[in-house]
Image: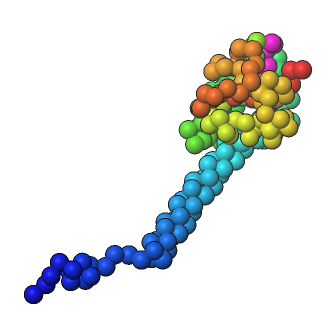
Amino acid sequence: MKTLSNVIRSQRGFTLVELAIVLVIIGIILGAVLKGQDLIENANAKKIANIPSQWEVPIWAYYDRNGGFPGDSAKDGAIDSHALLETALDNAGLGRPQATVNGVTVAISNINACAAANRNVMLLTNVPLMAAKQLDSNVDGAEDATKGRVRNCGAAGTTAAAAWGTTDPTNITYLFDKTIP
């Protein structure tokens, strides 16, 4: 017959060493998952940071061949619209990258950039803030968003440049043919 003390003795729990081993294994798994997420975020940021150069190559190749920008119907140096730019690149057989990469949308045209002057700009919308700062740092050498080629000039690219805020995702105004001082 089993007594209460016999039942208690026969029910053994985990030892402290066994619990420690389980906790170490859980910690290793969590660390690997978090590191994997960082690697994925960094890869996406690098892919987004490459968008401007992927567009600049065919645009400047077109410029070299034709003496003007694709989509510049008046031949005044101003790209009239993104659609005309794409059509001109396609007709020239230069190819072009996708207009949307990882949720980031690209539109290239001539606007009153950053409330200063008309410039040909590349508007990148829906950009993760981390990727925007990385692009700014890579191109301009600093994450200031108010000077150089990478700026924070609002959704339409027409407001005065401001420092990177906390809005995530954000928008980028990329001045690819001229830099405003």
Q: Position of residue 59 (x, y in %)?
A: 77, 35
The span shown in magenta is 116-120
Q: Is residue 36 visible?
A: no
Magenta run includes residue 171: no
Left or right relative to 47: residue 117: right
Looking at the figure, which quarter contains the N terminus?
bottom left
Q: Give the residue at x 67% y 39%.
A: 130
Q: Quadrant of residue 87?
A: top right
Q: Position of residue 163 (x, y in %)?
A: 74, 24
Q: Give the residue at x 67% y 45%.
A: 45
Q: Position of residue 52 (x, y in %)?
A: 74, 38
Nearer to the camera, 140 or 122: 140
- For the stretch drawn in magenta, what is the main secondary structure? strand
Q: Quadrant of residue 95?
A: top right
Nearer to the camera, 15 or 151: 15
Q: Position of residue 119 (x, y in %)?
A: 79, 19
122 over 24 or under it: above or below: above
Looking at the figure, which quarter contains the C terminus?
top right
| Residue that lies at the very extreme toward the left in this rendered image | 1
Q: Give the residue at x 70% y 47%.
A: 46
43 over 152 or under it: above or below: below
Q: Give the residue at x 84% y 28%.
A: 148
Q: How is the image coloured?
A: rainbow
